[in-house]
Image (tube, rainbow, N blue to C red):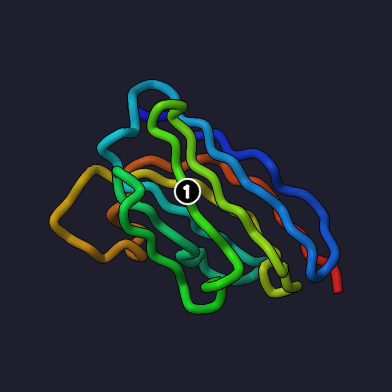
Amino acid sequence: QVQLVESGGGLVQAGGSLRLSCAASGRTITLYTMGWFRQAPGKDREFVAAVIWNGGSTYYTDSVKGRFTISRSNAKNTLSLQMNSLKPEDTGLYYCAARPPLSDTAYARESLYQYWGQGTQVTVSS
């Protein structure tokens, strides 16, 4: 079992920055692909970013490319999401998720993620 706890959310003005963190416990996440998802009010949860086990490859949804950076520390069992140039449409509940290493490279597919955190709220005011 893997327990995930997000932190770092808050209220920020458009153009500002936030850094989200996800702390994993229970077992090491070294071999897991890690991802961030978000859910805006009244909308489905959507993929934001993912990073493979060694940090060697990262994936982003188009709307955050160039603004968000996902990173991980296997030594500290943590995942981060640096969010710059925030926009009101980035508002939502941000979830950290983990999936075992799979041959399926559909990193945006929610159903492949086995473990989820409770989420941290990000609100971007205009």
On the image, the x and y values in percent for residue 76 come to: 46, 27
Q: Residues within 10 Å of mark 1 (few under 14, many from 20)?
A: many
Name the residue at 17% across, 60% down.
104
- 103 to the left or right of 43: left
Q: Which amino acid lies under the numbered mark 1 shown in the image of this protein?
A: Ser
Name the residue at 38% across, 32% down.
74
Judging depth in this view, the residue of 61 and 70 nearest the camera is: 70
Q: Quarter of the image holding residue 22?
A: top right
**What secondary structure is marked by label 1?**
strand
Q: Quarter of the image holding residue 75?
A: top left
- Counting labels gives 1
Name the residue at 49% across, 67% down.
46
The vertical placement of 62 against 79, above or below, is below
Q: Residue beneath label 1, please?
A: 71
Q: Quarter of the image holding residue 40?
A: bottom right
As drawn, which residue projects farthest toward the top?
26
The vertical placement of 103 against 88, above or below, is above
Judging depth in this view, the residue of 117 and 71 nearest the camera is: 71
- 27 to the left or right of 86: left
On the image, the x and y values in percent for residue 62 come to: 48, 78
On the image, the x and y values in percent for residue 120 come to: 65, 46
In which quadrant will I find the N terminus? top left
As drawn, which residue projects farthest toward the bottom?
62
- 90 to the left or right of 78: right
As drawn, which residue projects farthest toward the front?
56
